[in-house]
Image (cartoon, rainbow, N blue to C red):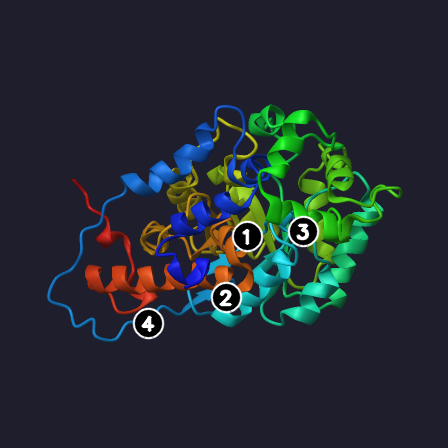
Amino acid sequence: MTAASRAQSIEDLRRAARRRLPRAIFDFFDGGAEDELALAANRAAFARLRLAPHALVDVSQVRTQAQVVGGPAALPLAVGPTGAVGYGRPGGDIAIARAAAAAGVPYTLSTSATASIEQIADAAPGRLWFQAYILRNRELLDTLIARAHAADYEALMITVDLPVGGKRERDARNHLSFPFRYTARNLLDFASRPAWAMGVLRRGLPVMENLKGLEAPAASATRLASSVGRSYDPSFDWTRLQAIRDAWPRKLIVKGILRPDDAERLAALGCDAVVVSNHGGRQLDSAAATLDALPGVVRAVGGRVPVLVDGGVRRGADLLKARALGAQAVLVGRATLWGAVAAGQPGAERALAILRDELQRTMQLCGVCQVADIGADLLFQG
């Protein structure tokens, strides 16, 4: 049996990825900011929520299909943007994108991916979204958006919760710095995972393909990542977002919202969807858990635009809980990342299959036959 087929949960895939990666690389993907309060709070919010299932319902046939931001999806789920996947496994971005297409769910390419906009469009035709960080280099940002349009991405996702980078202390403790510096600590760490290290020696450090023009001399992901950290635009505001809305002719999704008043204003501005997100706990460490923030955002938009939520999604039951609180769908990031790092495309496919199977089972146990029937009545009111 392969590492992917043995996995019974997303946590199993996480453990398999951990066994394969040096500690510094694993912690880069796994960690959060500062004391990792927001990271833990995201998962704890799902764990606190209890369900009150209907009994005596014919659940012999269950349908997990849903509408997600104006299009069909096999699950109420989209794959969210994850950067630097090539650090974990070469070709990891394409592996995840292909897994999403095979599973019938949208895939979001990160600005800081190790595959280009065009490579993903060629390798993984499906529902493609492009996530844009707001860079000081406006010309490069405009070029990226134009490339996504030319490659027929159906949606543009603007991340608005990152005016500056968060303080991720695991990276500092592991001597994972940008620009990268070899130290005795990280050399020993890398040597402890010879299969991973040999891959780096054969192929070199991965390249963030979409950011090659950001810092002309940079060729490796480490150099480019450092330039991105210096290049977020803290001046980005509502006026600039409106300009992007006016210029982009397709669906516009805004990610990184926790406040109802911001969500209401985004709906009025003409955005097509909002994502309740605290960036996976990687930026503001005292940010609210996303599931706790979700109901207020849903009330604020009043059905005018779909609301999605990310952060802490590890079980199929989490998809049902998010729907019960009013989300149209969830975004998953680490779940498919762990699958791809552990076993390439089969691992990413296994991650999505686990979530699909768990959602179907949870729906049957809760007495609901289709995603549209999932509502607040399933939440236990003790």
Q: Residue furthest left?
A: 56
Identify which amino acid the numbered label 1 is placed on: Val
The picture quadrant where one finds residue 294 is: top left
- Give the foreground label among 2 and 1: 1
Mark 1 and mark 3: Cα distance apart in space = 13 Å
Which residue does the image show at 78% across and 59% down from the upper left? 146
Badge 4 vs badge 3, beta-carbon distance below 8 Å: no
Quarter of the picture containing the N terminus is bottom left
Local SS, label 3:
helix
Q: Is residue 134 visible?
A: yes
Task: Using the image, tell me which numbered label, if any, was put on residue 199.
Answer: 3
Classify residue 150 as left or right of residue 272: right
Q: In front: mark 1 or mark 3?
A: 3
Label 4 sits on a secondary structure element that is loop
Residue drawn at the location 23% of the way across and 45% of the way down? 50
Q: Looking at the image, can residue 106 be seen?
A: no
- In the rendered view, does 307 fall on the left or right side of 185? left
Vertical placement of 246 versus 250: above or below?
Answer: above
To which residue does mark 4 refer? 63
Lower sequence index among marks 4 and 3: 4
Q: Amino acid at mark 2?
A: Val
The disc labelled 4 sits on which kind of residue? Answer: Arg
Question: Which label is found at residue 105?
Answer: 2
* Crowd band around label 1 with a 10 angstrom C-alpha radius: few (<14), some (14–19), many (20+): many
Residue nearest the viewer, comparing 277 with 208: 208
Residue that badge 1 annotates: 341
Question: Would you call the spot at circle 2 few (<14 residues within 10 Å), some (14-19), or many (20 or more)?
Answer: many
Residue 359 in picture, x, y percent from top left: 32, 61
- Marks 4/2 in contact by CB < 8 Å: the verdict is no
Left or right: 97 as drawn, with respect to 134: left
In front of the other: label 4 or label 3? 3
Q: Earlier in the sequence, mark 4 or mark 2?
A: 4
